Amino acid sequence: MRLRNKPWAPDKLASYPQYISNNPQELKGKWQTRFEKKQDIFIEIGSGKGQFIVGMAEKYPDFNFIAIELQTSVIVSILEKQIDKKLPNLQLINGHGGDLLDFFAPGEISRIYLNFSDPWPKTRHTKRRLTSPDFLELYRNILPDDGEIHFKTDNMGLFEYSLASLSQFGYVFRQVWLDLHQSNFTDNIETEYEQKFSAKGQTIYRLEAYWPNNKTQH
Ligand SMILES: C[S@@+](CC[C@H](N)C(=O)[O-])C[C@H]1O[C@@H](n2cnc3c(N)ncnc32)[C@H](O)[C@@H]1O
């Protein structure tokens, strides 16, 4: 994501500890205390400027949401939206998806959203892809049985890679969309990248996967 340097961003993040904790590791296992209501927590890794996660939190007040974004100069845009909207079911983490086990206890998160994740097309960068086995292992740790991963991208190569990676890891696909915007999926909240790429005529791919649980009927 291209960004303007915002030297004031760290101070601004530090000024709103009610929305973005200065020490998210301390909240491991206790995230429900940060929300008005105790209800399932969904996270997005790599939220960018937050159009998706803010839209989701507005549309679904009966779920709690956490935006995780690496770049301080980017997550400050999510914070600005939250300062305006004051959503009781939205929290922010300025951190790296690779540190999920420091942030969350086993089973604390019910669903993970990955939207337009960086594709890292070079083979030597495979491990950086957010659907690589190392990341799937982290997700497996923080999700309960039946926990879900929802993934959207315009990048066909990353989508093919992710289908194989998730399947080989043991996830089961509930549904796969090979052209989301031409489908009958009515529940879509577009991300900033999604709007940009679809305006250029790019196809958008989407999948929903879950961890199988013998007791569950799907
Ligand atoms: C291509 S942008 C997509 C942003 C947004 N999801 C969208 O669809 O508009 C990817 C974003 O993920 C963030 N990111 C990349 N790797 C990350 C990681 N390991 N942990 C947290 N954020 C990450 C980047 O800083 C960037 O803002």
Image (tube, rainbow, N blue to C red):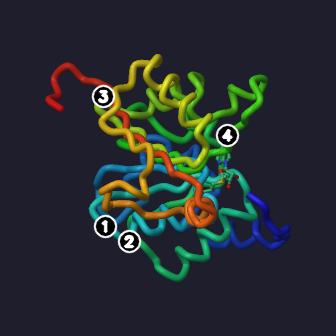
Mark 2 near mark 1, Cβ–Cβ under 8 Å? Answer: yes
Q: Name the amino acid, label 2.
A: Glu
Q: First in sequence, mark 4 or 1: give its number.
A: 1
Task: Name the residue carrying label 1.
Answer: 61
Expressed as whole percent of the image width and height from the top left, the position of residue 103 reads 54, 41
Q: Residue at x 47, y 80 (%)?
A: 85
- Residue found at the far bottom of this picture: 84
How far apart, in angstroms, are the residues tagged by discs 2 and 3?
Answer: 27 Å
- Residue 21, visible in the rendered structure: no
Residue count near mark 1 (Cα–Cα under 10 Å), binned few <14, some 14–19, many ≥20: some
Task: Name the residue carrying label 3.
Answer: 145
Q: Is residue 152 left or right of residue 127?
A: left
Expressed as whole percent of the image width and height from the top left, the position of residue 68 reads 58, 52
- Residue 94, visible in the rendered structure: yes
Please tell me whether mark 1 sits on a helix, a strand or a loop.
Answer: loop
Q: Name the amino acid, label 4.
A: Pro
Q: First in sequence, mark 4 or 2: give its number.
A: 2
Q: Quadrant of residue 12?
A: bottom right
- The residue nearer to you, when weighing 119 against 94, is 119
How far apart, in angstroms, are the residues tagged by discs 3 and 1?
Answer: 23 Å
How far apart, in angstroms, are the residues tagged by discs 2 and 1?
Answer: 6 Å
Mark 2 near mark 3, Cβ–Cβ under 8 Å? Answer: no
Please tell me whether mark 3 sits on a helix, a strand or a loop.
Answer: loop
Q: What number of labels is visible? A: 4
Q: Residue at x 43, y 63 (%)?
A: 189
State the mark number for residue 119: 4
